[in-house]
């Protein structure tokens, strides 16, 4: 939805950011169930702040609206369970009491409608000069019929009357009355239908007490068509409306290296993680359950990249590098193979020359030269003349592991080491043959 411009996207993001934390439920979801009962400041869709009290129980809670509120409030954003409201009131003793108010069974498919300074679908109230107010409507105008059995269910008890004339008023309203207006109409009777929410209420534990700012000191209660009409002065102290919300968990977080599935985000739903190939579970919980506080049980699982080098798979000094689901070995010189398991045969191809015998070693080889050759690869024909083996002026010619001395006159022998006899009669340098 955010293709058009960055600007539009930024605005949308800002709107959603506000909307996302706009009630007790979403605040609790964001806090992963860690919020405590207390007063919180939230914003309406225009970004204006107001205060609510969030009372959290196991799996649900109630929202109360501060009477200091002076901005528009979309009440329907503060509750999602329309089966009942609780009416808290405070007496002069300081003790606080609570009642539940619900539809009669015959009207139970209709929501109990809580509205802020409005009564859409309903008639009344009369003292609108005392606005803002919280309006709690029961049987909507459209369903009000003459001669119907109407009323409400207070603390589980059906309180009914016969609508004598079809007068469609079915509500209780609490006025903040910031400008101190006086009631404009008469005080009605104090009958059980009208005031069981007060008379039949039970005291709440002090730990649940609301701050005074949540109690509205003016109210109207109206069951039109012979049920009753009354307001304020029958009740000495203020009342507060608790709107019920259900708790949920946040969409469970994705975890690196894991596949996540979840049943849903309701209480009792589970989210399940499994580490994908190449990862292993190292911490946290692979199965988590959405608990009544709105938190996933346990802790976020961790799927760590399996270190395939941990078992030292590379042989012969090879360097292991871990990858996802694999590893590589950087072999030391002279080795090869996936895990450097092979000593490279440096005699293949044979580097030794001149008939030498090659012997493989690690990243090396030796050549066993045949006689007359030298050098790493026996590439050198040893110069047997180098040591000047020819004596007496003989001229040396190198051969293979051999040499030849060309002797000057008067000498002979392999190295011209033999001096021939000098004959007085001019037979010099002539070998005597057939001497015998
Ligand atoms: C809120 O108050 C109720 C009633 O005292 C209590 O049961 C509940 O545990 C409290 N919730 C939190 C989140 O503190
Ligand atoms: C309250 O207002 C209704 C509708 O405006 C009116 O019919 C009714 O008479 C008023 N009730 C009282 C007691 O003044
Ligand atoms: C409310 O009634 C009292 C007593 O009649 C009067 O003194 C006061 O001025 C009235 N207040 C308003 C806002 O009309």
Image: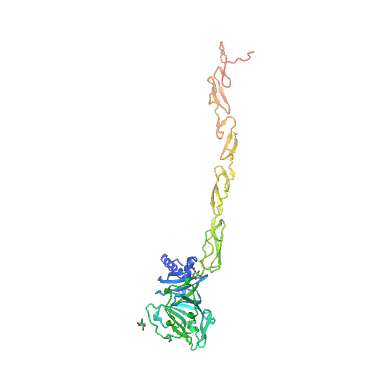
| Residue name at image x 57 percent, y 24 percent | 404
Horizontal side of residue 225 vs 277, given as left or right: left
Question: Compared to 376, does 289 lie above or below?
Answer: below
Residue 376 percent location from the top left of the image: 55, 34
Instruction: Choose between 41 and 98: the one closer to the eye.
Output: 98
Horizontal side of residue 308 vs 26, given as left or right: right
Residue 257 percent location from the top left of the image: 54, 58
Instruction: Choose between 390 and 286: the one closer to the eye.
Output: 286
Question: Compared to 216, does 321 lie above or below?
Answer: above
Judged from this view, the residue extending furthest toward the right is: 436
| Residue name at image x 40 percent, y 81 percent | 128
The quadrant in which residue 268 appears is bottom right
Judged from this view, the residue extending furthest toward the front is: 93
Judged from this view, the residue extending furthest toward the top is: 425
The quadrant in which residue 358 appears is top right
> Is residue 77 visible to us here?
no
Question: Compared to 185, does 323 lie above or below?
Answer: above
Quadrant where the C terminus is found in the figure = top right
Residue 65 percent location from the top left of the image: 44, 74
Look at the image and name its color scheme.
rainbow
Ligand 2, by image quadrant, is: bottom left
Residue 224 percent location from the top left of the image: 47, 85
> Is residue 396 visible to us here?
yes
Q: How many marks?
A: 0
Instruction: Choose between 49 and 177: the one closer to the eye.
Output: 177
């Amino acid at each position: 939805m955010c293709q058009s411009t960055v600007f539009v996207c930024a605005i949308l993001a800002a709107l959603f950011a506000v909307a996302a934390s706009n009630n007790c439920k979403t605040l609790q979801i964001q806090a992963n169930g860690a919020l405590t009962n207390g007063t919180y400041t939230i914003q309406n869709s225009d970004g204006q702040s107001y205060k609510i009290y969030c009372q959290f129980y196991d799996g649900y809670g109630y929202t109360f609206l501060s009477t200091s509120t002076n901005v528009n409030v979309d009440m329907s954003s503060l509750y999602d369970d329309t089966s009942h409201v609780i009416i808290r009131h405070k007496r002069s003793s300081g003790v606080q009491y609570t009642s539940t108010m619900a539809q009669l069974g015959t009207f139970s498919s209709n929501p109990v409608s809580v509205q802020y300074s409005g009564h859409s679908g309903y008639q009344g109230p009369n003292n609108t000069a005392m606005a803002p107010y919280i309006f709690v409507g029961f049987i909507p105008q459209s369903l009000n019929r003459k001669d119907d059995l109407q009323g409400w269910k207070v603390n589980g008890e059906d309180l009914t009357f016969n609508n004598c004339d079809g007068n469609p008023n079915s509500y209780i309203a609490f006025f903040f009355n910031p400008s101190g207006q006086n009631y404009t109409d008469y005080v009605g009777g104090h009958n059980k239908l009208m005031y069981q929410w007060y008379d039949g209420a039970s005291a709440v534990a002090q730990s649940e007490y609301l701050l005074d700012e949540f109690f509205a000191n003016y109210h109207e209660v109206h069951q039109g068509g012979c049920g009753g009409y009354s307001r304020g002065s029958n009740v000495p102290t203020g009342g507060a409306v608790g709107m019920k919300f259900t708790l949920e968990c946040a969409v469970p977080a994705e975890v690196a290296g894991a596949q996540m599935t979840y049943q849903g985000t309701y209480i009792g739903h589970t989210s399940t993680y499994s580490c994908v190939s190449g990862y292993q579970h190292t911490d946290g919980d692979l199965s988590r359950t959405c608990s009544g506080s709105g938190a996933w049980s346990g802790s976020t699982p961790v799927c760590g990249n399996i270190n395939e080098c941990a078992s030292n798979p590379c042989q012969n000094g090879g360097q292991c590098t871990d990858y996802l689901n694999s590893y590589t070995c950087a072999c030391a010189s002279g080795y090869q193979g996936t895990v450097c398991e092979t000593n490279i045969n440096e005699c293949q191809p044979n580097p030794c020359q001149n008939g030498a015998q090659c012997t493989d070693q690690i990243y090396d080889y030796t050549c066993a030269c045949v006689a007359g050759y030298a050098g790493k690869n026996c590439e050198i024909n040893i110069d047997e003349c180098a040591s000047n083996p020819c004596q007496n002026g003989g001229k040396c010619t190198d051969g293979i592991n051999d040499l030849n001395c060309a002797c000057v006159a008067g000498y002979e022998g392999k190295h011209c080491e033999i001096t021939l006899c000098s004959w007085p009669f001019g037979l010099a340098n002539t070998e005597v043959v057939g001497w015998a």
